[in-house]
């Protein structure tokens, strides 16, 4: 079935990260380490935010949401590599493939929106510190997070509806390690005009451009406020409070650009898998590390939790 043209498929076959047999074991253990370490550190951040009262602030509330998204993202994408090596099954049903793509798309949209909410939180903290606790109260934070999650869930539906309408594919072999939008569209022998229009109008403008512009505008005001601070120490403290978030924003948007918005001449299969692996495995690992190592509140919470465990034992 993988070699026939214009056929209706009921399942897909993943080629994985590499088809070289000698690389399968190193890839498996590398992915397993990244997955377990990412799962462990993100769950630690989530539990710290939930259990430590001093981390019950808007910034850490959104960070806990980000940790949940990262845990789900790595699980949805990397489990295919692990299952293929352990069980020897690199196939996925058509319905499961669409479901996997939908969940991953929701998680990416949610992460962009949560980071946008975090940029607004940093804007209020630096530009309007006197009104910060009044505006960014618990109800507002829960409302913002709920809206972000719901919008992410709704944004991906048009893509799945259009993909479900594709009647045939040139092959059922996906040269990837999970069900991603671009490889599937390339395999389709159906008319993809509607999908291209949706990707341009909805994907670029709403999913990517709007969150980016809102984040960009927030940081224009933030940087402007920082430069108006008279003392060097004050400017450094203000910048330090938003440096972790800004680093994550730059890393995520740059990785998504190279994964989905590169010129066609540079969009090779090998580079596409590399950026996908970076986006789905490395970034979820870097996000909590950036906040953990750069943030004294998180490190203090870890010390308090470690001390409490010693006392209990």
Image (tube, rainbow, N blue to C red):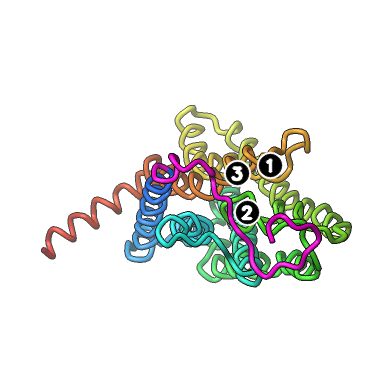
Please report the residue visible at 18 percent of the width from the left and 60 percent of the height from the top: 308
Pick the residue in front: 243 or 151: 151
Quickly name the residue at label 3. 273
Along the polypeptide, which appears first: circle 3 or circle 2?
2
Helix, strand or loop at mark 3: helix
**Magenta residues (range):** 1-26
Please report the residue visible at 63 percent of the width from the left and 65 percent of the height from the top: 97
Pick the residue in front: 220 or 4: 4
Furthest residue in direction top, as rendered: 232
Residue 112's mark? 2
- Distance from disc 3 to disc 2, alpha carbons, whole Å, reads 21 Å
Judged left or right of residue 44, residue 249 is: right
Along the polypeptide, which appears first: circle 2 or circle 1?
2
Q: Nearer the viewer, mark 2 or mark 1?
A: 1
Quickly name the residue at label 1. 257
- Distance from disc 1 to disc 3, alpha carbons, whole Å, reads 14 Å
Pick the residue in front: 217 or 228: 217
Please report the residue visible at 79 percent of the width from the left and 52 percent of the height from the top: 205
Judged left or right of residue 73, residue 225 is: right
């Amino acid at each position: 079935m993988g070699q026939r043209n214009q056929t209706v498929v009921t399942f897909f076959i993943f080629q994985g990260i590499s088809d070289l047999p000698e690389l399968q074991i190193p890839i498996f253990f590398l992915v397993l380490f990244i997955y377990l370490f990412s799962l462990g550190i993100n769950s630690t951040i989530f539990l710290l935010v939930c259990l430590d009262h001093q981390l019950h602030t808007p910034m850490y509330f959104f960070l806990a949401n980000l940790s949940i998204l990262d845990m789900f993202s790595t699980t949805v994408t990397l489990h295919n590599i692990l299952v293929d090596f352990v069980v020897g099954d690199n196939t996925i049903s058509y319905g499961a493939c669409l479901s996997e793509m939908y969940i991953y798309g929701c998680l990416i949209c949610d992460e962009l929106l949560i980071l946008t909410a975090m940029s607004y939180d940093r804007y209020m903290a630096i530009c309007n510190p006197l009104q910060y606790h009044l505006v960014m109260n618990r109800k507002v934070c829960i409302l913002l997070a709920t809206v972000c999650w719901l919008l992410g869930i709704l944004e991906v539906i048009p893509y799945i509806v259009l993909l479900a309408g594709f009647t045939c594919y040139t092959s059922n072999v996906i040269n990837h390690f999970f069900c991603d939008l671009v490889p599937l569209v390339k395999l389709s022998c159906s008319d993809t005009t509607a999908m291209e229009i949706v990707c341009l109008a909805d994907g670029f403008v709403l999913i990517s451009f709007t969150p980016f512009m809102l984040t960009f505008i927030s940081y224009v005001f933030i940087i402007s406020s920082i430069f108006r601070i008279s003392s060097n120490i004050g400017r450094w403290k203000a910048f330090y409070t938003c440096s972790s978030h800004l680093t994550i924003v730059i890393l995520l948007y740059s990785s998504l650009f190279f994964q989905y918005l590169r010129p066609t001449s540079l969009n090779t299969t090998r580079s596409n898998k590399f950026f996908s692996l970076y986006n789905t495995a490395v970034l979820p690992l870097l996000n909590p590390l950036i906040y953990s190592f750069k943030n004294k509140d998180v490190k203090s919470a870890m010390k308090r939790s470690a001390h409490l465990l010693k006392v209990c034992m």
